[in-house]
Image (cartoon, rainbow, N blue to C red):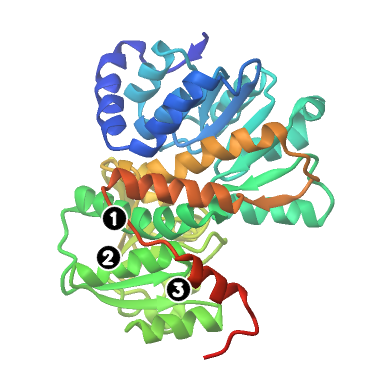
Amino acid sequence: MSYDVKDISLAPEGKKKIDWVQRHMPVLEHIKAEYEKEKPFKGITIASCLHLEPKTINLGLTLLAGGAEVAMTGCNPLSTQDDATAAGATMGLNMYGWREETTEEYYETIHKVLDHEPDILIDDGADMIFLVHKERPELIENIMGACEETTTGIHRLKAMAEDKALKFPVIAVNDAYTKYLFDNRYGTGQSTFDSIMGSTNVLIAGKTVVVCGYGWCGRGIAMRANGLGANVIVTEIDPIRALEAKMDGYRVMKVAEAVKYADLLLTVTGDIDVVTKEHFKNMKDGCILANSGHFNVEINKGDLMDMAVKHEQLKPDIEGFVMEDGREFYLLADGRLVNLAGERGQGHPAEIMDMSFAVQALSAKHLLGAKLENKVYKAPDEIDDRVSRLKLKAMDIEIDELSPRQSEYLANWEEGT
């Protein structure tokens, strides 16, 4: 095995964290045990570009148990946990990456993973897939396909497919029900506030929290903010989602109006320039700004820097920006996804990532025998069904089944009342 990590001596501490999450990832452990017997990935090399933390290492170990050579790197320069990568490097994984990489180092580590000449890619944000197309096209012929983890990456890949630029099939793991209904909603909701409260120690109850974007991640954040006692405002561009937010009990308005009330503003849209100069001009003094979208483009930090008469690092992951009129704003985690890039960010709970990474592991296996065009595909429904049933079993929950008469009734279009 080869590796390039910050400090290999951190491995024992990382191993403890991996042991802990394995106790709370029963579905992935079940799949790992199956793969260990079947070895579906024997002779296959799998490259991943994911947030490098204990739960992700456990996905790598699952693929390794299935016979794969596994090479892993991080999909965000601030989300890597160095003890976890050190542990992974001692457990049979080719591991590259460390926290606080420069942009240049970030892409260098992706190239190191690609040097293993992978057959399958597992990505989060599509940086690795895009890099293969742009700079490593010689690898494309060998690649069976890829799995993409997040909404932002799916948007990029669907655009590539639309332009006929995508050169191998991609499974949209993010679009699996057992991923986005749980990971995006419950995972993002909890992990976002875990990180913000751990970093700032502010009280959420009584605050006005503005949530920019009401997709599944935005729904989860709004739900958790409401549960913590906040007054929630939602901003949206989609009329149906805006109506849904209103009927869920939240105020809905434009970003330009919402910033006048925001004590805490969270972006979670996946798009660029959600909060810019025009919004900073009217923003409430003391507003805390954070992002839970994949890339650090939603809050325009360049505009903040240009407008600020004073800028200082108040804590490792909190920056203060003082405006000319004395108002001060606080940016968390450099505008990167706060639930992982924040100083106290641990990412989604293990019980949530248990399902998401189970879908990843099963989707990677699906690519082995599938004959797919160069398009973006939703993960097969049978994977969703299997993961949900395994999760219910692990939670000791039983559900009903249709009787033969009920099944016949539903299948018979002539049957009336």
Near mark 2 (Cα within 10 A), the count class, few <14, some 14-19 or many ≥20, is: many
Q: Is residue 347 above or below residue 6?
A: below
Residue 88 image-quadrant placement: top left
Tag 3 residue: 279
Amino acid type of the residue that numbered disc 3 sits on in the rendered structure: His
Q: Earlier in the sequence, mark 3 or mark 1?
A: 1
Give percent across and percent down for residue 63. Answer: 51, 25
Going by the image, does 168 lie left or right of 224? right
Q: Could you tell me which residue is drawn at 42 percent across and 25 percent down?
A: 33
Q: Earlier in the sequence, mark 3 or mark 2?
A: 2
Q: Could you tell me which residue is drawn at 43 percent across and 57 percent down?
A: 184
Q: Earlier in the sequence, mark 2 or mark 1?
A: 1
Amino acid type of the residue that numbered disc 2 sits on in the rendered structure: Arg
What is the C-alpha distance between the residues marked 3 and 2? 25 Å
Near mark 1 (Cα within 10 A), the count class, few <14, some 14-19 or many ≥20, is: many
Q: Residue furthest right?
A: 164
Amino acid type of the residue that numbered disc 1 sits on in the rendered structure: Gln
Q: Residue furthest bottom?
A: 417
Tag 1 residue: 190
Q: Could you tell me which residue is drawn at 26 percent across and 15 percent down?
A: 12
Viewer-proximal residue, 39 or 202? 39
Give percent across and percent down for residue 403. Answer: 45, 66
Please name which of the two marks, 3 or 1, marks the residue nearer to the observer: 1
Please name which of the two marks, 3 or 2, marks the residue nearer to the observer: 2
Residue 335 appearing in the image = yes
Query: Is the C-beta separation of discs 2 and 1 under 8 Å?
Result: yes
Q: Could you tell me which residue is drawn at 44 percent across and 23 percent down?
A: 61
Helix, strand or loop at disc 3? helix
What is the C-alpha distance between the residues marked 3 and 1? 27 Å
Tag 2 residue: 224
Residue 83 image-quadrant placement: top left
